[in-house]
Image (cartoon, rainbow, N blue to C red):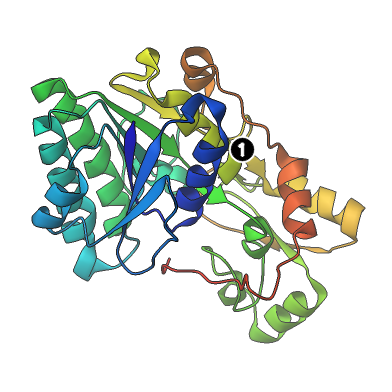
């Protein structure tokens, strides 16, 4: 088994590589990490290929002898790159994969941006049958195109593809910084822009957290997944016959409720909450299909997600760096 991992230096890629190398089920598996801007250290089971998936020649070389592909590489809101890397790059990967004599399984990590997460109202749980509904911007559109392209290659050529659709992926202290009123906020909304400047500075100093409300005035519910749970789902899907040409929602059992977050942080850490109205919509991704077909279970609930983020201590050689905008 030789697994090509794109986006191998990201939070999911690095955690997946470590998880696979430690898993006795894959003791003979080798990894080829396709790296563009950053590199990994090579070992007896990990080799590094350099280049961009937007370059067909690079993709051809990277796929030589590969049995499995785990496709993680993506772009956020970078219009100059998003079509070349995310869309064309996936096309070259799928084209070469389907023509390869050694190819066995292609796993794509999708995203709930493809169904609009909290930008669109959903009348019920978001299952794998929910229609694609991108929100404004290139990133959400690219997630729709990725899922559709993988599905169509299965229809056109019988490609053994599997898509694991993940919401916002948390690792280390990420979740803590999703709630920051400072300039160190991770992702969006950018809370400091939603309150007066002086208030934002005070909230950042005291560690206050936003209590985001949905368009109906209730505490907003939004889906998350911890990187460890996503990696366990990837490992469960590898060579699983029940994963063939399937789409799975991979997320926590319940969405994160900003009201419950505020209550728990007030009780456990004495942090104040700040009401933030919005026109966003609560939603609930249904992960029962992955549980049933893959035998997978998430291990993170709300309290563990919060506690792990607040208890995480960074070492000096592990600075907090966000590698993509948005």
228 lies above or below 24: below
Q: Position of residue 180 (x, y in %)?
A: 67, 68
- Residue extending farthest to the bottom is 198
Q: Quadrant of the C terminus?
A: bottom left
Question: Considering the image in quadrants, where does the N terminus appear?
Answer: top left
Q: Position of residue 29 (x, y in %)?
A: 41, 33
Residue closest to the far front: 44
Based on the displayed image, in which of its 4 quarters is residue 156 positioned? top left
**Residue closer to the observer: 288 or 262:** 288
- Residue sitting nearer the eye, 112 or 172: 172
> Residue tagged by mark 1?
255
Label 1 environment density (alpha carbons within 10 Å; few <14, some 14–19, many ≥20): many
Seen at 49% across and 52% down, the residue is 14
Q: Which residue: 71% across, 36% down?
A: 301
Residue 324 seen in render: yes
* SS at circle 1: loop
Residue 162 left/right relative to 289: left
Count the labels in the image: 1
Task: Return the x and y of residue 39 as percentages of the image width and height.
Answer: 39, 65
Q: Answer yes or no: is residue 251 visible.
A: no
Q: Residue 200 in the image: state x and y as whole percent.
A: 68, 79
Which one is nearer the viewer's eye here, 206 or 196?
206
Quadrant of the rendered image containing residue 107:
top left
Q: Residue at x 34, y 42 (%)?
A: 114
Q: Is residue 105 above or below residue 72?
A: above
Above or below 190: residue 45: above
Please give the name of the residue rendered at 63% of the width and 48% of the height, measured from the top-left corner: 217
């Amino acid at each position: 088994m030789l697994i090509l991992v794109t986006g191998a230096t990201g939070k999911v890629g690095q955690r997946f590589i470590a998880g696979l190398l430690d898993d006795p089920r894959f003791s003979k598996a080798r990894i080829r990490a396709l790296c563009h801007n950053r590199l990994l250290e090579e070992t007896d089971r990990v080799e590094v290929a350099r280049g961009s998936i937007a370059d067909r020649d690079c993709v051809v070389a990277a796929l030589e002898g590969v049995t499995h592909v785990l496709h993680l590489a993506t772009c956020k809101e970078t219009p100059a790159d998003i079509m070349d890397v995310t869309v064309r790059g996936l096309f070259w990967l799928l084209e070469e994969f389907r023509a390869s004599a050694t190819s066995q399984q292609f796993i794509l990590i999708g995203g709930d941006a493809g169904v609009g997460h909290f930008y669109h109202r959903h009348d019920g749980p978001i299952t794998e049958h929910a229609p694609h509904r991108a929100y404004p911007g290139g990133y959400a559109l690219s997630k729709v195109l990725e899922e559709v392209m993988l599905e169509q290659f299965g229809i056109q050529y019988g490609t053994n593809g599997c898509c694991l659709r993940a919401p916002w992926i948390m690792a280390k202290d990420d979740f803590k910084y999703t709630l920051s009123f400072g300039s160190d906020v991770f992702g969006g909304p950018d809370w400091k822009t939603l309150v007066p400047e002086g208030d934002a500075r005070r909230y950042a100093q005291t560690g206050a957290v936003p209590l985001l409300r949905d368009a109906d005035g209730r505490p907003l519910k939004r889906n998350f997944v911890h990187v460890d749970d996503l990696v366990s789902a990837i490992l469960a899907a590898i060579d699983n016959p029940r994963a063939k040409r399937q789409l799975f929602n991979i997320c926590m059992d319940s969405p994160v409720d900003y009201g419950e977050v505020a209550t728990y942080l007030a009780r456990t850490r004495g942090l104040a909450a700040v009401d933030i109205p919005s026109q966003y919509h609560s939603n609930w991704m249904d992960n029962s299909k992955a549980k049933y077909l893959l035998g997978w279970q998430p291990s993170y609930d709300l309290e563990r997600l919060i506690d792990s983020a607040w208890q995480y201590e960074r070492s000096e050689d592990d600075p907090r760096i966000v590698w993509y905008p948005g």
